[in-house]
Image: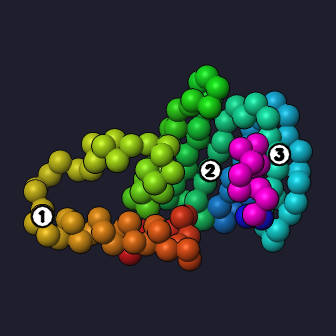
Amino acid sequence: MPESYLRDPEVFPEKEGEMGSIYIEAADKVDLKKIKDITFINARDVLGIIYTSKSGNSKLKWRQLRGRIGRVTGEASTNSLVNLSMARVITPEYVESLLPQGEPENPAEAEARIDQVVRESESPHTDITQEPK
């Protein structure tokens, strides 16, 4: 993302295609710049965002409720949940509430697995549309 767009809350990426997509629904939007397969747009009064991962494992929709407050619905991979949590779209407590409540796992193994997912999600080369390994 160009540096000048990082601080602008009205700039969003959009991506079309079979291999993952992001679509912004807004009352007013203007294309700013296209870099490879991503178009940066200026959007005012965002009503919704539709996201589909490259793998197809995540299909999410965000709908505006009031102002910048909205609701996310759909299916998300583990990696998408970590990224949503790190972006403060959902809370870590909510992510934990979604985890299966089956057999308790070894605490050391669970902590190592969580640490690995967090490390992968913090890597500058992590593709948020791929499942963690």
Q: Are marks 3 and 1 in contact (CB under 8 Å)?
A: no
At label 2, the amino acid type is Tyr
Report the disc number at residue 107.
1
Answer with mark 1 or mark 2, whichever residue precedes in sequence.
Answer: 2
Determine whether, in the image, residue 131 is placed left or right of residue 111.
Answer: right
Q: Which residues are magenta?
A: 3-13
**Is disc 2 placed on a helix, strand or loop?**
strand
State the residue position of label 2: 51
Query: Which one is earlier in the sequence, the residue at label 3 or at label 2?
Result: 3
Quadrant position of the N terminus in the picture: bottom right
Q: Secondary structure at mark 1?
A: helix
Q: Tell me which residue sits at (71%, 56%) in the image.
A: 6
Please tell me the numbered disc located at residue 9. none
Quadrant of residue 106 within the rendered picture: bottom left
Q: Which x, y percent locates residue 8?
A: 75, 48
Q: Say whether residue 27 is left or right of residue 88.
A: right
Q: Is residue 7 magenta?
A: yes
Could you tell me which residue is drawn at 48 percent across and 46 percent down?
A: 88
In the picture, which quadrant includes the C terminus? bottom left
- Give the residue type at disc 3: Asn
Q: Residue at x 33, y 72 (%)?
A: 116
Q: CB atoms at circles 3 and 2 under 8 Å apart? A: no
- For the image, the number of numbered tags is 3
Mark linked to residue 42: 3
Marks 3/1: CA–CA distance:
45 Å
114, above or below 84, in the image:
below
> Label 1 sits on what residue type?
Pro
Q: Is residue 96 above or below residue 123?
A: above
Residue 33 in picture, x, y percent from top left: 88, 60
Marked residue nearer the N-terminal end (3 or 1): 3
